[in-house]
Amino acid sequence: MTPTMEIEIINRLGLHARACAKLVKTAAHFESAITLSDGKSSADAKSIMHLMMLAAAQGTRLTLRAEGADSEQAMAAIKQLVEDRFGEEE
């Protein structure tokens, strides 16, 4: 079974270009296939274009999925990045 986790975008600007770039950079450190889904569409977490197309605003709840040998570590790293508001002040 593929591990999943619910995350909420809490930074004020949502998944904008800079936040997406940080997420892609984090995801690229892992071998696992990582996706984010809003229930209508899903995005490869290693593709900035896919992530930007989610248009996830502040308050959007996403399902994070990772499949591979390092899936638990990948999900933990992405969860931490989101909880840290992608390094933004707000």
Image (tube, helix red, strand yellow):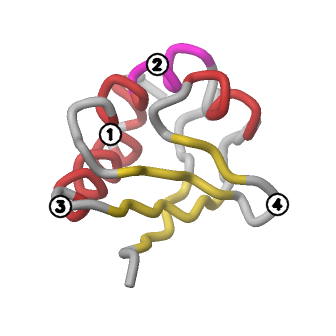
- Kindly state the secondary structure of the residue where label 2 is placed: helix
Pointer 4: residues within 10 angstroms few (<14), some, or many (20+)?
few
Residue 44 occupies quadrant: top right
The residues tagged by marks 3 and 4 sit, at their Cα atoms, a distance apart of 27 Å
Q: Amino acid at mark 3?
A: Ala
From the image, state whether disc 1 or disc 3 is nearer to you.
3
Q: Write down the residue under mark 3.
A: 69
Quadrant of the snapshot with the N terminus: bottom left
The residues tagged by marks 1 and 2 sit, at their Cα atoms, a distance apart of 12 Å
Q: Which mark is residue 21?
A: 2
Q: Residue at x 21, y 32 (%)?
A: 29
* Number of dots carrying numbers: 4
- Kindly state the secondary structure of the residue where label 3 is placed: loop
The residues tagged by marks 4 and 1 sit, at their Cα atoms, a distance apart of 23 Å
Please state the extent of the stretch shown in magenta in the rendering. Answer: 17-22
Instruction: Give the mark nearer the N terminus: 2 vs 3.
Output: 2
**Residue 85 placement, left or right of 39:** left
Q: Residue at x 24, y 44 (%)?
A: 31
Instruction: Give the mark nearer the N terminus: 3 vs 4.
Output: 4
**Residue 39 placement, left or right of 1:** right
Q: Write down the residue under mark 1.
A: 81
